[in-house]
Amino acid sequence: MQGAGKAMKGLTMSDTALLYRTLSVCAECLRVVEAQLISRNGAVFFRKNCVEHGTSDVMAWPDADHFRWMNSFSSPINRPKASASQEFGCPRDCGLCARHLQKPRSVEIEVTRGCNLSCPVCSMAVDEVECDPTSDALKKMYSEIREQAGTTPTIELTGGEPTLRPDLPEIVQMGLQAGFKNINVSTNGIVIARDFDYLLCLKESGLTGIRLQFDGLTASVYQQIRGADLLAAKCQAIENCGRAGLRVVLAVTVFEDSNLNQLGDIVRYAMAHLDVVVELALQPGFIPGSSKTGESKRFSMGDIILALADQSRDLLGPYDFLPQGCSHPLCSAGTFLLSNPNGFVPVTRNISPEKYETAFHQTIPQASVFRDIVAKQAGADAKGLWLTISNPMDIQTVELDRLRRCSKVVAALDGRIMPVCSYRLTGCQGHRIHPLVDMHRESTNAT
């Protein structure tokens, strides 16, 4: 990875090879522009061309061969019910329009914008919404999700910090009454670490699981990323979830200069806590709206995969991670670390793109394909750890083709559900393509 970064200096146009063309959005004016993915000195760069603001190059993946391999996978298209009109074109017409290619598998509902932390890396500080959605508004959102996506998707109750709402158990029950079977809460863990009774109320309300923000295994990491030493609270939250019988996904936001060097230790920690932890979910960290003109590199899923391979003590290799099969192949990847008497082994090892395609279970098209492979190879009750990595796009790397394949969506207050990367897309000047305040006012005026 370091070699690719150093190679960027002194290159000429003749050092490049075109991988493919796409459409993107100018980071300055937010207009749709032509873009190319190019290979240069072993790495992949995202180049976009705006008539007004010129050409920009951003390193988007550290290894070109690995990028080509990951992008060679494919899975079936499963179109959703179109609900949004097509007036201005992608990405401004989000909701799910007639051009969207994939049904949602996960829907986020932001139940609050309030939080009990002031994380230096958090985008919530940028957004200003006057109040939390009311119970009636949330019922309407559940209804809209059911109408547009059915009841198959997992519901993720997010924030802000959702456990600040005393009526969160009622919000969970509301979703179950609407017909949804899987409802999780994404939390920083502070409340559920100190208030076990509240956690039990969530469990008794029908909550499926906890998605716990988990940045590392040292106090310094939390001080840097969250502005406070939260390690003890994280460990207590995990212990409490185990006592309550709630499964936990450890959600790690990875920053190159903060916790990238702890990934191997985090994997080993998760493997040692399989009685509670069912998945380790990682994603590159960035702050929407923080992009600056002239940046030369974006931290990516590819960087995380290579770091895991480097730090896992030969447990993992870069080609053990397969696309999840429910979105564009560059949007998410993962493996299953199967537990056996000799330790752990990634079951996805040595699966070719051809075998991957034939293994896809057509009757459950939103299930991640390697989960189906695991069920066939090791049984549905196989013990181990899911390890997943998402690759969110920001204003520097957004591709409209990838947005149209997105299956991870957010329910907006105005009734739309839209790809999470489109929902949060913010230009270098701090302007969102889909302003939250405007959507909040539309919802308020409609009720």
Image (spheres, grey):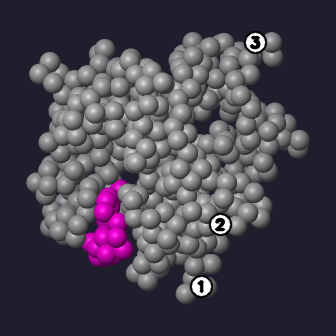
Up-down: is 145 above or below 255?
below
Q: Quadrant of residue 168?
A: bottom left
Query: Is residue 172 in the magenta section?
Result: yes
- Choose the circle earlier in sequence order: 3 or 1: 3
Q: Which residues are magenta?
A: 162-186
Q: Quadrant of residue 134?
A: bottom left
**Secondary-structure class at tag 3:** helix
Image position of 165 (left or right of 365): left
Query: Which quadrant is the C terminus positioned in?
Result: bottom right
Residue 84, label in figure: 2
Count residues near mark 1 (Cα–Cα under 10 Å), then give few for <14, some for 14-19, many for 20+.
few
Residue 435, how many percent across, how many down? 64, 65
Residue occupying the point 56% across, 72% down: 415
Up-down: is 182 above or below 301?
below
Image position of 389 (left or right of 33): left
Count residues near mark 3 (Cα–Cα under 10 Å), then give few for <14, some for 14-19, many for 20+.
few
Residue 92, how many percent across, how many down? 71, 59
**Which amino acid, mark 1?**
Ala
Residue 346, how many percent across, how many down? 30, 24
Residue 446, label in figure: 1
Could you give the CA–CA distance between mark 3 and mark 1, rounded to whole angstroms?
A: 55 Å
Q: Quadrant of residue 335?
A: top left
Residue 15, label in figure: 3
From the viewer's side, name the closer residue of 145 and 225: 145
**Secondary-structure class at tag 1:** helix
